[in-house]
Amino acid sequence: MAAVESLVKVEEKPVNREKTCPLLLRVFCAMGHHNNLSEYYRGAVPGNELQIYTWMDATLRELTGLIKEVNIESRVRGTTFDFVLVSPEYNSPRFNAFEIGTTIAGNRSPDDSKTLGNTRFSIGDYLDVCITPPDRFLRRPAPMRYRN
């Protein structure tokens, strides 16, 4: 039965952006690496914050475009954006990290159409984005859950 449930796609209701109030999405971008999870401890956050007002139906491609508007170094074609969801652990001051997708500036990727609503995102979570320019794309950054 569990296998059948995993195959069923949940239809996402479109958000009426004219009538629905946007949410504040706190995004932390770093060049070439993800921020360390210890930087999110007890209400502290990394200093590289970008605040975006958006909706739950915002795609990773849309968020990539918003990041490129303010981050000049990330506008180069072939730049990779690795998105990680950072959410607080229940009844604890610690945070958990979950990889949610990767986009590439100027190219299509399978995660382009993934929305915040399709991920484990809930209001109050953070996004940590590793921006890797094409000349530094020697290897993918290590997932956050393996870094101390």
Image: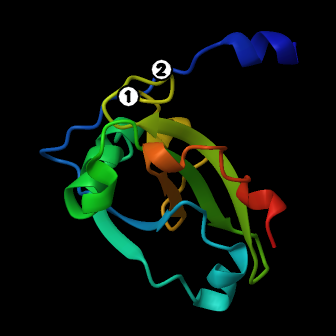
| Residue matched to label 2 | 11
* Percent position of residue 140, x then y: 65, 45
- Residue at figure coordinates x 70%, y 11% from the top left: 7
Residue for point 36% across, 26% down:
107
In the image, 82 versus 57, the foreground residue is 82
The quarter holding residue 69 reads bottom left
Q: Which one is nearer the viewer's eye here, 128 or 147?
A: 147
Q: x, y percentage for residue 88? A: 67, 70
Looking at the image, residue 146 lies above or below residue 132: below
Distance in Å between CA atoms under marks 2 and 1: 6 Å
Q: Amino acid at mark 2?
A: Glu
Position of 58 with respect to 31 (left or right) is left
Sort mark 2 into few (<14), some (14-19) or many (20+) by Cα contacts within 10 Å.
few
How many residues crowd around disc 1 within 10 Å: few (fewer than 14), some, or many (20 or more)? few
Of the 4 image quadrants, the one containing the C terminus is bottom right
Residue under numbered circle 1:
13
Q: Position of residue 100 (x, y in %)?
A: 60, 42
For residue 54, say whether it is visible.
no
Element at label 1: loop
The reply to whether callout 2 and callout 1 are in contact (CB within 8 Å) is yes
Q: Is residue 137 left or right of residue 108?
A: right
Q: Residue at x 27, y 49 (%)?
A: 75
**As shown in the figure, which amino acid type bears the numbered disc 1?**
Lys
Residue 55's spot in the image, x, y percent? 32, 49
